[in-house]
Image (cartoon, rainbow, N blue to C red):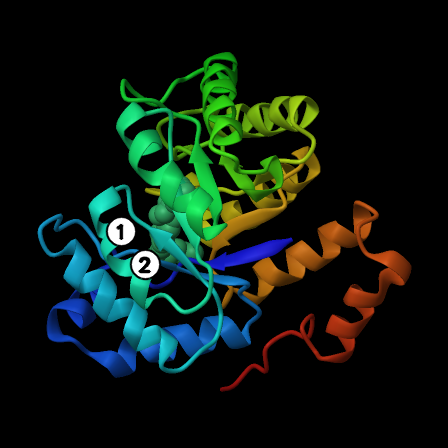
Amino acid sequence: MKIIGEKINGTRKRVAAAIAERDQTYIQDLAIKQSEAGANWLDVNAGTHPAQEPADLTWLIETIQAVVETPLCLDSANPTALQTVLPVVKKTPMINSISGEPERLEKILPIVAEHGCEVIALAMDDKKIPKTYEKRIEIIDAILAATRAAGVADGKVYVDPLVMTIATENQSANIACDTIRAVHEKYPEVHFTMGLSNISFGLPARKQINRAFLTLAMQAGLDSAIMDPLDKELVAAILTTELLLGRDRHCMNYVRASRKGLFDPPVKTG
Ligand code: THG
């Protein structure tokens, strides 16, 4: 299971303030903590100000690269912003994301192919996010035809079934898992990822929901997630689920994590 650290996201209030104030220390602390916790990529999202996005994203990237070597996952739907920042990115980044929208495919796919990037493909087009998994598969078919035509190998593509909150869409987790199963069946080389915490927006005790959903989605074939690597119990759930799914030969990762104290309860004070 590959972890994409979610924390450097300008839609989070504290991060938006750090971007506005050019507070390097706050961003660098998030980068270091997530990398030390085992993040394989750091998602970098500059927030929702299109005019400022290229400048803000450039600042974020340079700030992060000054302290960690972890590859970045550039979280932007804006081809211009992506083109602007690529020259400052040191390690080949993951691009988050393309979708069935023709403009995004036309403008972002050449960048992905040229730089050999991994790329997240959202199961949506320019109309809307489809409710049924059948419609999502149709869109994924069209996107994979386009990535293959551009010379991008299926193994570089991470399909994102698009997770809606279970608070307003009762079948959200089921639709995501069904989409993963169906795409995996049809395209065995393709990887999967999702914005895990999306599932719990608007509900109490979110970590509880995130953890259980991760386990279900891994059973369906999820092999990566945009998630909080600092949630120790979530990381413990990954290791335990991998063990149970037969993805941990000789139980080595599980035993090693146990020796390192990952499963120990926190020390109670007072
Ligand atoms: N798919 C893709 N990219 C994405 C998303 C997706 N990028 C953005 C988002 N969705 C994934 N990132 C986040 C980041 C933070 C949160 C949710 C999704 C979030 N954080 C809470 C907070 O900031 O307070 C804490 C969550 C918690 O308690 O664990 O909600 O779907 N391709």
Which type of secondary structure does the marked residue at label 2 adopt?
A: helix
Q: Position of residue 192 (x, y in %)?
A: 57, 39
Q: Is residue 227 above or below residue 70?
A: above
Q: Residue furthest right?
A: 250
| 230 relative position to 178: left or right | left
Residue 204 visible in the displayed image? no
Q: In which image quadrant can residue 163 be found?
A: top left
Q: Are marks 2 and 1 in contact (CB under 8 Å)?
A: yes
Q: Position of residue 225 (x, y in %)?
A: 53, 49
Q: Nearer the viewer, residue 162 or 101?
A: 101
Which type of secondary structure does the marked residue at label 1 adopt?
A: helix
Residue under the point 37% across and 24% down: 100
Q: In which image quadrant can residue 106 be found?
A: top left
Q: Nearer the viewer, residue 241 or 39?
A: 39
Residue under the point 43% across and 47% down: 114
| 194 relative position to 185: left or right | left
| 200 relative position to 158: left or right | left
The amino acid on which the numbered mark 2 sits, given as a three-letter code, is Leu
Q: Is residue 14 above or below residue 248?
A: below
Q: Is residue 188 above or below residue 242?
A: above
Q: Which residue is mark 1?
A: 83
Residue under the point 31% across and 25% down: 101
Q: Position of residue 221 (x, y in %)?
A: 67, 37
Q: Is residue 176 above or below residue 80?
A: above
The amino acid on which the numbered mark 1 sits, given as a three-letter code, is Gln
Q: Which mark is residue 86?
A: 2
